[in-house]
Image (cartoon, grey):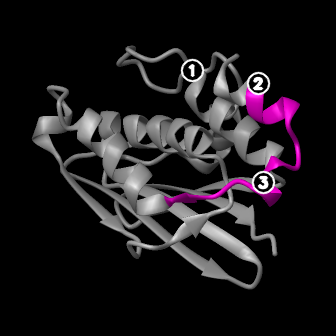
Amino acid sequence: LPDKARARLAPGVSGKAACLVREVAAGVIAVVKRTPRGKQLSFVVDAAEDFVAPVDEGDLSEILGNLVENATRFAKSLVHVSASARAGEVIITVVDDGPGIPEAARHAALLRGVQLDSKGGGSGLGLAIVSDIVEAYGGRLEMANANAGLAVTIYLPRHG
């Protein structure tokens, strides 16, 4: 089963699942850095070595894989992944320094098969898959234009 289907079939798995964000992010970035586009960019991971997210490692890899791949497509020079915690939530953000997405188009970006760019190369499924996985864990996804790019933030409830 695709990761999103696995996550969807196992709601509540978030109560027991956990993985190291920095380790998963580093693995995703190592793969992306081998691509022609990835070789042109800088990547930063801002997460403590022992920072844990309440999500299955495969699901976090799918989430970060899609978000980092999207950021890589649009970034001018930098992709930044950060993780933090606050009042019952784990917050993971992927920011690029590309053009961002107009606020009016953000909802459409989450729909299956919708691509907002004319570059091609994608299926229009990435953000929809991320949103499905995050929702299966009781979380949410938000997008906002950052200083010079797009910030996609996922919020996951902490358990225990």
Which residues fall within the magenta stretch? 6-20
Q: What residue is drawn where x is 50% and y is 72%? A: 51
Q: Is residue 52 above or below residue 34?
A: below
Work out which quarter of the rendered image holds the N terminus and state it: top right
Which residue appears farthest toward the bottom when viewing the image? 87
Quarter of the image for residue 32 reads top left
Q: Is residue 92 magenta?
A: no
User: Are there few (<14), some (14-19), or many (20+) residues within 10 Å of tag 2?
Assistant: few
Q: What residue is drawn where x is 43% and y is 67%? A: 82
Q: For the residue labelled by badge 2, is the local secondary structure a helix, a strand or a loop?
A: helix
Task: Give the distance between the C-alpha atoms of the residues marked 3 and 2, in whole angstroms.
Answer: 15 Å
- Residue type, mark 2 in image: Ala
Q: What residue is drawn where x is 32% and y is 33%? A: 73
Between label 3 and label 2, give the one nearer the viewer. Answer: 3
As rendered, which of 49 and 91 lies closer to the eye?
A: 49
**Can you give x and y, in whole percent of width and height, for residue 113 in the image?**
64, 16
**Can you give x and y, in whole percent of width and height, for residue 79 in the image?**
30, 53
Between label 3 and label 1, give the one nearer the viewer. Answer: 3
Which residue appears farthest toward the front when viewing the image? 16
User: Are there few (<14), some (14-19), or many (20+) residues within 10 Å of tag 3?
Assistant: many
- As drawn, the label of residue 5 is 2
